[in-house]
Image: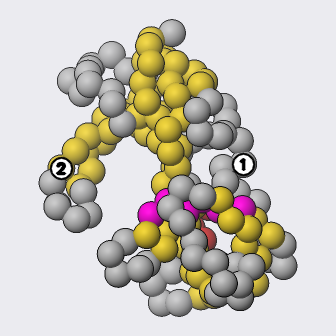
């Protein structure tokens, strides 16, 4: 039985959709018959189908052994570059430290769920800005981007 490793991609069987009081979850089964829950609401535009296989990155394994899976994005791959409309600054809170940080929300014709992590002009009053960005990660169905340059 293989241990899953951070940063690697594995295949999972989508067994069923489970409704719990807090959310709906896909039950995923790996090739060694271990089960995982995947929050369904983040992946509504991923075309995940029951009784089919999907591939997921292991985004993180925390100190308690909890495994955070991220299905492969239906359009983008890490390292790809594309143009996005940066339209709003959003304040977020880091889960562990509770410290605030800012991201620039972005979208284009391929996705409406994207955020630029290194956009420094947070006082920018002239939205939208059209910029070339690089895909660096995916988290909870959101495309995380690195700002490269304005269009």
Left or right of 8: which side holds 45? right
Residue beneath disc 1: 74
Indicate the position of residue 98 as horizontal and vertical percent values: 17, 61
The answer to which quarter of the image holds residue 61 is bottom left
Crowding around mark 1 (Cα neighbors within 10 Å: few <14, some 14 to 19, many 20+) is some
> Which of the marked residues, 2 or 1, is nearer the chain's N terminus?
1
User: Alpha-carbon distance for marks 2 and 1?
Assistant: 30 Å
Residue in the image at 60% along x and 58% along y: 8
Label 2 element class: strand
Give the main secondary structure of the magenta stretch: strand
Query: Residue 96's quadrant in the figure?
Result: bottom left
Quadrant where the N terminus is found in the figure:
bottom right
Magenta-colored stretch includes residue 113:
no
Q: Is residue 17 visible?
A: no
Q: Secondary structure at mark 1?
A: loop
State how the image is colored: secondary structure
Which region shows up in magenta?
55-60
Q: Which residue is mark 2?
A: 100
At 59% across and 39% down in the image, what residue appears?
78
- Left or right of 7 on screen, residue 74: right
Is 131 situated left or right of 2 in this image? left
Question: Where on the picture, by quarter, is residue 103?
Answer: top left
Residue 107 horizontal/vertical position (percent)? 54, 34
47 to 118, vertically: above or below: below
The furthest residue to the right: 51
Q: How many marks?
A: 2
Residue 57 magenta: yes
Q: Residue at x 50, y 61 (%)?
A: 6
26 or 8, which is in the foreground?
8
User: Height in image: 132 above or below 35?
Assistant: above
């Amino acid at each position: 039985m293989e241990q899953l490793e951070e940063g690697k991609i594995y295949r999972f069987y989508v067994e069923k959709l489970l409704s719990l009081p807090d959310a709906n979850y896909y039950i995923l089964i790996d090739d060694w018959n271990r089960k995982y829950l995947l929050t369904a609401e983040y992946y509504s535009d991923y075309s995940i189908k029951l009784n089919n296989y999907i591939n997921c990155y292991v985004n993180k394994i925390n100190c308690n052994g909890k495994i955070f899976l991220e299905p492969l994005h239906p359009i983008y791959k890490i390292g790809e570059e594309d143009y996005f409309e940066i339209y709003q600054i959003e304040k977020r809170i880091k889960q562990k430290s509770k410290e605030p940080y800012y991201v620039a929300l972005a979208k284009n014709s391929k996705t409406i769920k994207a955020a630029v992590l290194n956009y420094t002009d947070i006082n920018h009053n002239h939205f939208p800005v059209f910029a070339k960005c690089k895909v660096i990660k995916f988290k909870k169905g959101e495309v995380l981007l690195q700002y490269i340059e304005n269009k």
